[in-house]
Amino acid sequence: MFYDLNVPWTPNSLDLQRTISFLSELGYSTLALAHTLSGKLPPTITSPIPRPLPFPTPKNLRLLQRCTLTLSDPSQNHRLAALTNAYDILAIRPTTEKALMQACQTLDCDLISIDLTVRHPYHFKHKTLHAALQRGIKFEICYAPGVVASDSMARRNLISNATQLIRATRGRGIVISSEASKAVGCRGPWDVINLTTVWGLGQERGREAVDREARSVVVQAEMKRRSFRGVIDVVYGGERPEPKGAKEDTTAAKQGENEKRKAEAISGGREKADQLEAPISKREQKRRAKKARLEANEHNSVAPEVVAPELTAPDNPHVTRM
């Protein structure tokens, strides 16, 4: 999965549609449409990028909304919390050394995007950039303004500044984006990886710049919006499991009910079978009636034997037996 986190949004939907379609054909799966803000912010901050876009887009392409805030005065309050709620990704573009230091040390953002096509009056220091890396903020290098520019000075500045930025960050936390307003400025992921080797970034780190590092920016920005202080996110984890004892009791009760139902079904089936027996024929009725009469006669003929008491005369000497 390859990412391009800087596709400038323009009201001209024709050029934007061509750029999005071409980037999708090149192999990018996630694009961020960037809206640039500078100066004083309006009272109500809303994203002008419509959802969904007024033209058809590829089905497997994920589109995000990004805000690039140009920062020149470090003392001005730019209400970054409101920007974070209105956009998916918040990027800071510092124009001075003080603004860069503030963005690296205190400002809550997702990306630091430096314009590398101009000559800066200061050098990138490892200590300053390392403070941003420790806070999880990535640095962005945009190749299209230097590649497509007709001025050779912009290309020289891009190569020089990109090399210096990679040296100061030790090649860590680098994200490569296009910032191409037209399809002619877009390059494929593997062309971008080869371009990073010219700047002094290894091929493996160049692959991470358009894949792993860019994905971490998207995930971290989503965690900031959805979770509590970017640490805890509440997701659906299923139903609460029942206690083990209650589960066994429920299983035993279910088994008892099943056995009871089976016994009732068997007894009911027997009763129903008895009720549904075939009717007795007349011949069988006569045979059973004859058998019953014989049994009754035998019972009446057998009478209990009565033993009569023996009559004896009392012992009297004056009575002579005959």
Image (cartoon, grey):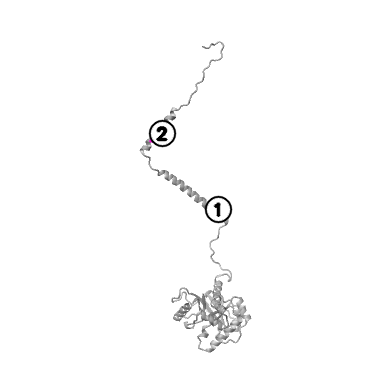
What kind of residue is marked 1?
Asp
In the image as oriented, which residue stretches furthest toward the right? 127
Of 236 and 58, nearer the camera is 58
Report which residue position mark 2 lands on: 292
Residue drawn at x 56%, y 87% as measured from the top left: 157
Q: Circle 2: is it few (<14), some (14-19), or many (20+) Cα within 10 Å? A: few
What kind of residue is marked 2?
Ala
Residue range (magenta) = 287-293
Q: Is residue 322 above or below residue 308?
A: above
198 within the magenta span: no
Q: In x, y percent, where is residue 18? A: 45, 80
Give the CA separation, mark 2 to mark 1: 55 Å
Residue drawn at x 55%, y 53% as measured from the top left: 249
Q: Main secondary structure of the magenta part?
A: helix
Q: Circle 1: is it few (<14), some (14-19), or many (20+) Cα within 10 Å? A: few
Report which residue position mark 1 lands on: 249
Q: In x, y percent, where is residue 256? A: 52, 50
Classify mark 1: helix, strand or loop. Answer: helix
Residue drawn at x 38%, y 37% as measured from the top left: 285
288 within the magenta span: yes
Q: In x, y percent, where is residue 28? A: 49, 77
